[in-house]
Image: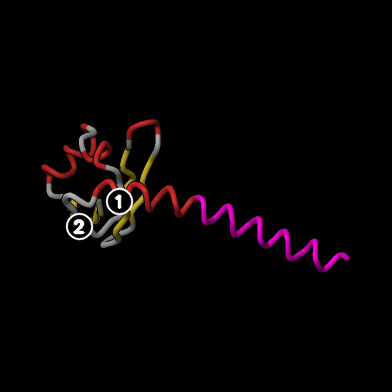
Amino acid sequence: MDITNKTKKPLSIKLPGGKTLRLGPGKTGQITSKAAEHPPVKRLLDEGVIEILGDGGTHGTGGTSSDSGGAGSQTRSSGGAKRRSGDR
């Protein structure tokens, strides 16, 4: 699910698991469907401070975020491999 900051100030949104999402003015981030049910997120949504976009594709978004983390790890590994190759 995509979440958008509708204000002109940066937001710090508390998510489940002790995580925090920081969004600049007008910026968009991604959250899971579980996070969308979290009371602090619901409160901001009711106040009109944030907007949540997304529907049935929420599970795919969560997977994408996991894949993104894995891709970052792979990128670091391949960068290390390049250095090792240069040391030979």
Gap between marks 1 and 2 measured at Cα: 24 Å
Q: Is 75 one of the magenta-colored residues? A: yes
Q: Which element type, helix, strand or loop, lies under badge 1?
A: helix
User: Where residue 26 sits: x, y (%)?
Assistant: 26, 62
> How packed is label 1: few (under 14 Cα within 10 Å), some, or many (20 or more)?
few
For the C terminus, give its image quadrant.
Answer: bottom right
> How packed is label 2: few (under 14 Cα within 10 Å), some, or many (20 or more)?
some
Question: What residue range appears in magenta?
Answer: 70-88
Q: How is the image coloured?
A: secondary structure
At 86% from the left edge and 65% from the top edge, which residue is drawn?
87
Q: Is 22 one of the magenta-colored residues? A: no
Q: Earlier in the sequence, mark 1 or mark 2?
A: 2
At 23% from the left edge and 35% from the top edge, which residue is drawn?
40
Left or right of 65 on screen, residue 31:
left
Query: Residue type at mark 2?
Result: Lys
Q: Which residue is mark 1?
A: 60
Q: Which element type, helix, strand or loop, lies under badge 2?
A: loop
- Which numbered circle lies on residue 6? 2
User: Where residue 56 sits: x, y (%)?
Assistant: 17, 49
Instruction: State which quadrant residue 13 falls in.
Output: top left
Query: Residue type at mark 1?
Result: Gly
Left or right of 40 on screen, residue 81:
right
At 12% from the left edge and 49% from the top edge, which residue is drawn?
48
Residue 29 position (above or below residue 41) = below
User: Where residue 22 sits: x, y (%)?
Assistant: 37, 49
- Please identify, in this view, whether the residue under mark 1 or under mark 2 is nearer the observer: 1
Q: Main secondary structure of the magenta part?
A: helix
At 34% from the left edge and 45% from the top edge, which residue is drawn?
12
User: Where residue 33 sits: x, y (%)?
Assistant: 24, 41
